[in-house]
């Protein structure tokens, strides 16, 4: 019998290192659970008959199975359950905003107290497997002789490659940088996602049999047509890359940088390499323009590099800020300042580099297409912020390079246009993730790419329109009660989903 306990383990939503300590280096902010803490937290799970937490997860992570096994100290089974649908467990455990419309937000326990810390238990399991007890990967179906080229080695490309490999297809990833991981490598700070976690989990996918060709930019070094000569299908997962810019007067001054490019410079080869080449890039007074997670990443990274004064400028108020509220709180704890209801109208300088940013005071008017109130300037009210540098993080659109050079049909805002089966305008070429939707969460891009990989599998095997996905075979063919009991008994009823 499951006994509901309103108490929980440690501070909510997770234990953190002290602000004084973490603002001085790039060590991980989020502190892990001990084995005992993970088991206690997992034991709070009600083992719901209809686990809405699974439905809320873009990759259908078996939260219920994980919690039940961890509560009983059966870490091997817990790992098997969650690895079936998610090849990047440690990455998503750290990067998912679980409380923002995902698994923890859907947890029914929250109606009687705080929701389960699903991400923390998932992280414990990922760390346990990486550091204490390496486990075998999930089973695969027999080889089909079919080959798929995956363009892009970020989380979406890795998730698609892992699923296609399990279906028995040969998979080759083409990645233009020297590292797998995409935005997760260069766009998520080390204090949020240590590189060793991403490297390990990407490496496990490669060890399973995925071939990787780094330093190859498809559309420049090799064409889609050539890939189709060597493979039976191509899956494009190039992510979001096209940054939005400002036409504000003075925007051409030195010291004004694309925030996404800044993060890439810092994290692509590492902080030490960045400091050797760009040690004086920022100065001591840094202004960040934007209100999303990337703006917060820029601000907190700049703070650690300069130990100076960092201010985030956002044109709406705090409650309308799209950034994860937890990240906003952490930034404030570390000393980042915020100027809400402010919008840059001019950059001023000495003729060569920026020295200040003039901002208009804003007020919120009628709701716009996003449902948020539209910011409007208050006539006659402005002020000037002193700055040595400005980082612009005001959004990114899909990477449009490939569609431009290859002639793929474009959709809204430069996205690659796809149909309901993820097919592009070029026969045999499919596309998924941020390249088709615009910038989104890592786990959502992974879920989108897995669906695309499913369609590619159906295309390769002649099952279009009538194949049942692995997820449906595993979770939906049987009653919930029987399915869960079979999981506990170790009877999986055929190949589980990747």
Image (cartoon, rainbow, N blue to C red):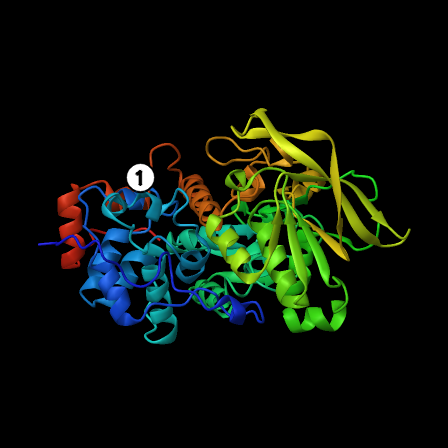
The answer to which of 249 and 468 lies nearer the viewer is 249
Tally of numbered discs? 1
x, y percent for residue 101: 39, 42
Q: Nearer the viewer, residue 214 or 184?
A: 184
- Residue at far top of view: 366
- Residue 205 appears in the figure: yes
- Residue 132 in the image, given as x and y percentages of width and height: 34, 76
Residue depicted at 51% across the width and 28% down the height = 371
Q: Is residue 235 left or right of residue 143?
A: right
Residue 269 left/right relative to 71: right
| Callout 1: SS | loop
As drawn, 361 above or below 132: above
- Residue 236 at x, y = what percent? 56, 45
In the displayed orientation, state which residue is furthest to the front: 380
Tell me which residue sits at (24%, 59%) in the image: 42
Q: Which residue is mark 1?
A: 468
Up-down relation of residue 183 to residue 136 (above or below): above
Indicate whether 210 appears above or below 340.
Answer: below
Q: Crowding near pointer 1: few (<14 within 10 Å), some, many (20+)?
A: few
Work out whether residue 406 or residue 306 is closer to the camera in this orientation and state it. 306
């Amino acid at each position: 019998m499951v006994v509901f306990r309103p108490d929980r383990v440690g501070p909510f939503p997770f234990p953190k290192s002290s602000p004084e300590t973490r603002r001085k280096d790039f060590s991980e902010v989020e502190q892990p659970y001990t084995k005992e803490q993970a088991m206690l937290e997992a034991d709070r799970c009600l083992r719901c008959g209809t686990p809405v937490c699974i439905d809320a997860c873009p990759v259908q992570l078996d939260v219920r199975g994980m919690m039940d096994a961890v509560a009983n100290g059966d870490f091997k089974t817990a790992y098997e359950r969650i690895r079936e649908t998610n090849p990047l467990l440690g990455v998503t455990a750290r990067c998912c905003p679980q409380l923002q419309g995902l698994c923890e937000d859907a947890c029914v326990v929250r109606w009687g107290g705080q929701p389960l810390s699903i991400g923390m238990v998932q992280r414990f399991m990922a760390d346990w497997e990486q550091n204490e007890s390496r486990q075998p990967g999930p089973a695969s179906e027999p080889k089909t002789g079919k080959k798929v080229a995956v363009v892009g080695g970020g989380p979406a490309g890795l998730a698609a490659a892992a699923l296609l490999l399990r279906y028995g297809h040969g998979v080759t990833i083409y990645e233009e940088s020297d590292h797998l991981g995409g935005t997760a490598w260069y766009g998520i700070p080390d204090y949020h996602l240590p590189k060793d976690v991403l490297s390990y989990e990407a490496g496990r996918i490669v060890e399973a049999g995925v071939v990787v060709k780094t330093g190859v930019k498809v559309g420049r070094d090799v064409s889609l047509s050539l890939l189709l000569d060597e493979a039976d299908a191509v899956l494009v997962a190039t992510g979001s890359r096209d940054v939005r810019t400002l036409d504000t007067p003075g925007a051409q001054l030195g010291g004004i940088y694309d925030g996404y490019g800044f993060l890439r410079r810092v994290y692509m080869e590492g902080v030490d390499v960045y400091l050797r080449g760009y040690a004086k890039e920022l100065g001591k007074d840094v202004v960040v323009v934007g209100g999303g997670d990337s703006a917060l990443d820029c601000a907190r990274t700049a703070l650690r590099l300069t130990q100076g004064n960092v201010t985030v400028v956002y044109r709406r108020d705090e409650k309308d800020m799209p950034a994860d509220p937890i990240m906003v709180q952490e930034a404030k704890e570390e000393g980042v300042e915020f100027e809400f209801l402010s919008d840059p109208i001019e950059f001023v300088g000495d003729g060569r580099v920026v020295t200040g940013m003039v901002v208009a005071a804003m007020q919120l008017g009628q709701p716009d297409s996003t449902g948020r109130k539209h910011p409007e300037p208050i006539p006659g009210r402005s002020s000037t912020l002193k700055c040595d540098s400005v980082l612009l993080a005001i959004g990114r659109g899909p990477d449009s390079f490939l569609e431009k050079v290859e002639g793929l049909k474009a959709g809204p805002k430069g996205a690659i246009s796809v149909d309901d089966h993820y097919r592009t305008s070029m026969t045999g070429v499919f596309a998924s993730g941020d390249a088709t939707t615009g910038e989104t969460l890592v786990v959502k891009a992974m879920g989108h790419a897995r669906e695309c990989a499913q369609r590619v599998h159906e295309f390769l095997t002649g099952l279009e329109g009538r194949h049942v996905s692995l997820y449906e075979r595993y979770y939906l063919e049987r009653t919930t009660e029987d399915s869960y009991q079979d999981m506990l008994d170790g009877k999986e009823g055929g190949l589980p989903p990747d």
